Amino acid sequence: MSAERLDADVRGWLEKLGLSSLPSAITPQFVSNVCRRALRMTELVSPNSICHWLGGNDAESVIERLAQYHVELTTSESYNDWLQKEWGIASQTRQNVSIK
């Protein structure tokens, strides 16, 4: 699709990603390449994004903040056990299970 026929915001994203136009077919390889490029662009994605969004921009500040607000962390494997122990909720959902 030619760049002239695209909306301004799409043209802007294409320019940021170094693309002149969209391919005629959006293949898995194209998506993989563009996503990899985008995830490495600091103007689009903050480095250490977990630390950035949780505040403080470094791990030590984040850990202090989590402790200050009594945030509990668990793994997805332990989540159902934690939910039962802490809240008395029996849950056997599998929605967050990652593909191995």
Image (spheres, rainbow, N blue to C red):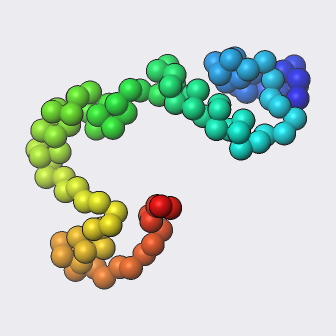
Q: Percent x, y for residue 61? A: 17, 32
> Where 80 falls versus 37 (above or below)?
below
Q: Quadrant of residue 17?
A: top right
| Residue 28, x across and y down, in percent | 71, 44
Q: Is residue 22 left or right of residue 88?
A: right
Q: Residue at x 88, y 23 (%)?
A: 2
Q: Quadrant location of residue 57?
A: top left
Residue 81 seen in the figure: yes
Q: Is residue 40 left or right of residue 1?
A: left
Q: For residue 12, say whether it is visible.
A: no
Q: Is residue 38 above or below residue 85?
A: above
- The single residue placed furthest to the front in the displayed view is 100
Please name the residue shown 60% across and 34% down the image.
35
Residue 64 is situated, as x and y percent measured from the top left of the image, at 12, 38
Give left or right: position of 52 versus 24.
left
Quadrant of res 6:
top right
Is residue 24 positioned above or below 91 on the image? above
Quadrant for the N terminus in the image: top right
Residue occupying the point 65% across, 32% down: 33
How many marks overall?
Answer: 0
Question: In the displayed structure, does residue 61 sit left or right of residue 93?
Answer: left
Give the residue displayed 31% in from the left and 82% down from the top.
90
When the figure is inspected, residue 72 is found, relative to residue 37, above or below; the finding is below
Looking at the picture, how far across and down is residue 89, in whole percent?
A: 28, 79
